[in-house]
Image: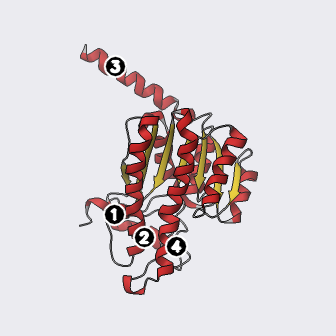
Amino acid sequence: MSRYICAYKFNIFNMKNNFVTNELEGKVAVITGAASGIGRATAALLYARGVSVVAEDYNPAVKEMAEEFPGMVTLVGDVTEEQTAKEVVDLAIKHFGKLDILVNNAGRIINKLVVDTTLEDWNLMLATNVTGAFLHSKEALKAMIPNKSGAIINIGSYACYFSFPTISAYSASKGALAQLTKTAALEGIEHGIRVNAIGVGDVVTNIINEHQENGRDFLAEHGKLAPIKRAAEPEEIAEIVSFLASERASFIVGSILMADGGISTIIQ
């Protein structure tokens, strides 16, 4: 009997692997911060796997994605504004009839000591990294609840749990995002909606370019501090988003899935 069960499980595993590239086909996703980095990589990957994507970003460059990916819908908007959240969910329903996946990816970081952090810095960090996720989750849940299904994936950080000097506002926002994830997960699961987050480490993106010269090079070098001895590429995080949005992750609820090259195992 045990040999039969093992063979059965092996066949199911292989079957799922064979269909991993189209397991999300027919789904509809909203992705914030989609013009670059993890957001763009996620939009491209889900699109390639048959997902109808609404890509949102405050950067007008997001509009170019509609040309590169025919059928993709784009929205230029500020993630921190309630109207943007309502509009992007309405776009998904208007163009594709439903919403199955929300990826709260939009984020920013600032490196300042507490004594140098202004109230404006603090408010902007929380508004972008957690209020934006709250607003979009709220509107997404309204659309998903009647369908009794859905997946919300928040792009967090190892700063959901750990910190170091100069990132007080950032770590506070990511800590809040972790708690938002857990609470929304408890509220959503009774409606068949799974909410999770990814605790990413250093990823080679443009997130610090505004404050750091050669930001991508800095992140690539900083990533070498992790046990894996490198930073991630955005496509690696996009694969995790795809997994969490799929039925393969059906038992994962309210988790902060760490994808940080092991850095959280050595931070005290």
Indicate the amino acid at tag 3.
Ala
Q: Answer yes or no: do the residues labelled 4 and 1 have beta carbons within 8 Å?
A: no
Q: Earlier in the sequence, mark 3 or mark 1?
A: 3
**In the rendered structure, which disc, 2 or 1, sits on the residue that comes first in sequence?**
2
Helix, strand or loop at disc 2?
Answer: helix
Disc 3 versus disc 1: distance between alpha carbons? Answer: 37 Å
Q: Earlier in the sequence, mark 4 or mark 1?
A: 4
Q: Secondary structure at mark 3?
A: helix
Looking at the picture, does residue 6 appear above or below residue 167?
above
Task: Residue 7: give x, y in percent of width and height.
Answer: 34, 19
Q: Residues within 10 Å of mark 4 (few under 14, many from 20)?
A: many
Q: Secondary structure at mark 4?
A: helix
Where residue 7 is drawn, which disc sits there? 3
Q: Quadrant of the C terminus?
A: bottom left
On screen, residue 55 versus residue 260, left or right, reads right
Q: Label 2: which residue? A: 170
